[in-house]
Amino acid sequence: MRRQRHEISPRAGIVTGILLLLFSADIFCLNRFERGNDLPRASAILQGQPVVASADGRVVGIEKIDDLDQAVYITHGSAVTTRYGHMAAVDVRRGQLVRSGDVIGRVADQLRFEVRVAGRPVPILASASSPGMDERSRRFATLYGKGDALLTSNAEAALENYREALRLWEGKGDRQEESIALFGVSRAEKNLGRLDEAQKAFERALKLMKSVQGRQPGNREVYDFAIDLLMEKEKREPGRGFESAAFELSERGRASALLASLESRLESVRALKLREIQESLDSGTLILSYWLGDERSFLWVVGRDSIASRQLAPRQEIESAATRAYLALSESNRRGSQASAALAARNLSRLLLGPVDEETLGQKRLVIVPDGALSDVPFAALPDPAEAGRPLLDRHEIVSLASASERRALQTKSRPAPQHLIAVIADPVFGGGPGQEERSEPDRARSVASLDLSRLPSLPSSRLEAERILNLAPGNSLRVTGFSANRDFLMSGGLSDFRYLHFATHGITDTQHPERSGLVLSLVDREGRRQDGLLRPSDIRNLRLSADLVVLSSCRTGQASLVRSFRDAGASRVIASLWNVDDQATAELMSRFYEALLRRNLPPAAALREAQQSMLESSRWAAPYYWAAFVLQGEWK
């Protein structure tokens, strides 16, 4: 049996707005949606053309639109209004069909919404406001839409449309529309090969965006474009610093995304310069920083005195391979699955590590800064390009960070020195009568199988896991099990003075609403009364920890909100899992990990590597499913 998790919903983005604006006889429909602070993405389609929109591999349809004199504005969760004031009382949900007059569309269910014309994707930006926009705004949207439609086939004509759109707002006070037009100009100049002009226009656009938003823009599309532009300049003029500038810009993008996150309070996180990052490295450590782009992706290999970059495949190819590898490795315990798991891992390794030569990697510690779906990849289980058939784990200690700059924030965060060694929180009570620790049928998975928390299966191996760990600890330790493993105890500050914290219980993962995720503690008290037993990210952030290490021995606890919340609370590093983990195998892995950590005083990253290697070498636990799910995130020293 597995330590299960409960995942309330699939990974999905929320579409907050779609504007269908009909204009001209040849190019008449502009489709736009917003993503938080992102600039809008839109697509022009030809009159009468059926359009296919792909969201995360799923297909939704937009049928033929023949009415050229109608606009529809769709707001998530509200009614649909046409330009003529017609109302359709609908609740716009993911994938729901929306009708208004002759306009038929679907709301995408992912952040990325791709429209295809004659089978070709047309990802472009557009500006639009509400229905009933003034004439200048309407003219701007038309010009910008035409520019987008012409960008790939006739960049000169596209540039003229963008420039005319820019003239409508330049110096007129609307800095957002002006910045969008400048961004269009920059894209057209890049397509024409005039990279210096593209950079100048982009820098003007970025300055305007920052003045409107009051801080560095968090728009992923803006960073994608700028990084690709700088790397193209590096390709044309190597050695002039464009490679380093692109890496530093990627760090600004990651820091911006982190600070924009509702879950994070690591306000000290700022994007560091390359030199600052390098000064924090020793000669035995390399950073592998990935950035996935629509047309091509990039890898920067950063050492103490060096930086090198490699061009990788487009985002879709890499993320598809990453998803296949994740699924195969997370099911590699099944009979006959080893060959498919090895193939999927090998294909992903070729995409991510193949371009890096053996001499560069050596036997150094690898600090992985992932992007997108790579956050779910257990790099330790990927084949080493230099060692046919052997995983990276053999020659490398592997650590993960959300950004290369994040480590500085973790190091400078002040916290008191812990006075006690370790606290183990395990085997809470999920049901039972007064004074009893009644157990449901045991399960070998540490995740929630249903929303009814009262029916959670017990985790007998977690109690054994706790006993093994505490037997290795030389005093100054705390065992918190049964009824004692409750939310009130944790929130009262009972864990604030321990160096190591270990949680062995069920985990809940809600990918759409991360604040609803959490760790499940005792759901009843000693009198049999129900109580709130879910330790949520907001609770975790208020724990005020001094921990050098938090271990989340549950399923899919590697989700960003949980890990980040523990780091916000003061933890220097967190070990968490990427998939549903086996109860017995996890207890065995953790026993080996703590033996190396507590008895032989190895650093956490080295102790985890040694424990995973020993599992790999055993016949019973050799499949990556049993050991590769656990990843250390944070400080490695």
Image (spheres, grey):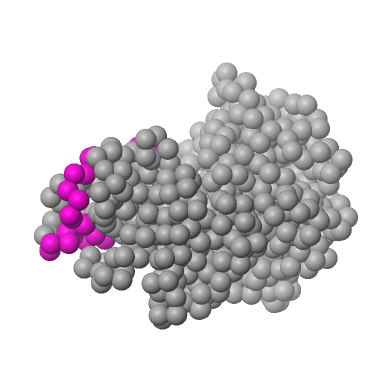
Instruction: Please report the bounds of the magenta region as a residue range.
Output: 57-85
**Residue lying at 67% horizontally and 51% vertically, measured from the top left:** 232
Side of 607 relative to 64 (left or right): right
Q: How many marks?
A: 0
Q: Quadrant of residue 549?
A: bottom right
Q: Who is closer to the viewer here, 356 or 501?
A: 356
Q: Residue at x 57, y 48 (%)?
A: 293
Instruction: Work out which quarter of the rendered image holds the C terminus and state it.
Output: bottom right
* Relative to 288, residue 131 above or below: below
Q: Is residue 298 left or right of residue 22?
A: right
Q: Is any atom of residue 239 visible in this view?
A: yes
Q: Is residue 321 above or below residue 549?
A: above
Asked whether residue 76 is drawn in magenta, I would say yes
Q: Is residue 60 left or right of residue 424?
A: left
Residue at 74% in and 38% down: 355
Indicate the position of residue 243 as horizontal and vertical percent values.
73, 56
Instruction: Decide which of 280, 419 is in the foreground and name it.
Output: 280
Q: Is residue 117 above or below residue 574?
A: above
**Front-most of residues 289 and 217:** 217
Residue 281 x, y percent position in the rendering: 82, 60
Counting from the top left corner in percent of width and height, residue 540 is at: 53, 66
Q: Is residue 121 magenta?
A: no
Question: At 87% from the left edge and 40% from the top edge, which residue is drawn?
Answer: 359
Give x and y (percent) for residue 534.
Answer: 44, 59
User: In terms of image quadrants, where is residue 614?
Assistant: top right
- Which residue ends up furthest to the top in the rendered image? 336
Residue 452 visible within the image: no
Q: Is residue 246 left or right of residue 386?
A: left
